Image: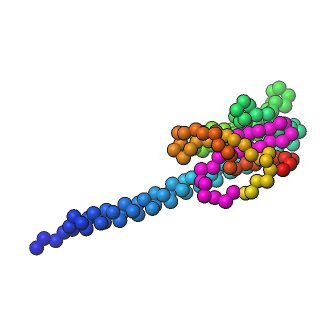
Amino acid sequence: MKKGFTLIELMIVIAILGVLAAMISGNFITSLKKGRDARRKGDLEQISRALEMYYEDQKLYPTPIPGNTLPSQIKIDLNGSKKKIYMEIVPTDPSTGSSYSYISNGTTYQLYACLENNQQILPYITSSSMTCTTQCYQPDGKTLTTTGCIWGIASPNTTP
């Protein structure tokens, strides 16, 4: 008598392994999204600190370059030969490499990012001035659409 597995037994084992792999990969993809979102939030905090140091010295915030983005460096010329650098390289979105949305009139600023994970609890925004639309990539990473920003930081003197 031959000992071995039947075709049905092998197919059942493969199906079970497939279901387990699908469950694990779904959790893995979600954790990657959460990680990129955490980086986006951290980037906005770092940029905010650099902007506050800039404001402390200059009494105004840097003006955005066309497209509502920050310059690639946040720096000023002190006396033509020396430069004070507040942020050597301004961080960009970890998925797309595009700049974060930056709006400033010199006295206030607002920074925005699009988050990938739509299953998180977001702070309640009461200010209509804390809303924007920006171009964000869809989850496929290729489709660029204009959408509402869902994470933002504003200067301390921004009124709701």
106 inside magenta stretch: yes
Identify which residue, 90 or 100, lies in the foreground.
100
Q: Is residue 139 left or right of residue 71?
A: left
Residue 44 is situated, as x and y percent measured from the top left of the image, at 71, 47
How are the colours assigned in the image? rainbow
Q: Residue at x 58, y 38 (%)?
A: 144
Residue 13 is situated, as x and y percent measured from the top left of the image, at 31, 66
Identify which residue, 48 or 13, lies in the foreground.
13
Identify which residue, 41 or 73, lies in the foreground.
41
Q: Is residue 57 visible?
A: no
Q: Residue at x 84, y 50 (%)?
A: 160
Q: Is residue 67 left or right of residue 51?
A: left
Q: How many marks?
A: 0
Residue 75 is situated, as x and y percent measured from the top left of the image, at 77, 35
Q: Residue at x 80, y 35 (%)?
A: 62
Q: Residue furthest bottom?
A: 1
Identify which residue, 11 or 33, lies in the foreground.
11
The quadrant holding residue 2 is bottom left
32 inside magenta stretch: no
Q: Residue furthest front?
A: 128
Q: Residue furthest top?
A: 80
Q: Is residue 157 visible?
A: yes
The quadrant holding residue 56 is top right
Figure quadrant of the N terminus:
bottom left
Residue 145 is situated, as x and y percent measured from the top left of the image, at 60, 39
The quadrant holding residue 86 is top right
Q: Residue furthest left?
A: 1
In the image, which residues are magenta?
A: 101-122
Q: Residue at x 89, y 39 (%)?
A: 59
Q: Is residue 113 left or right of residue 74?
A: left
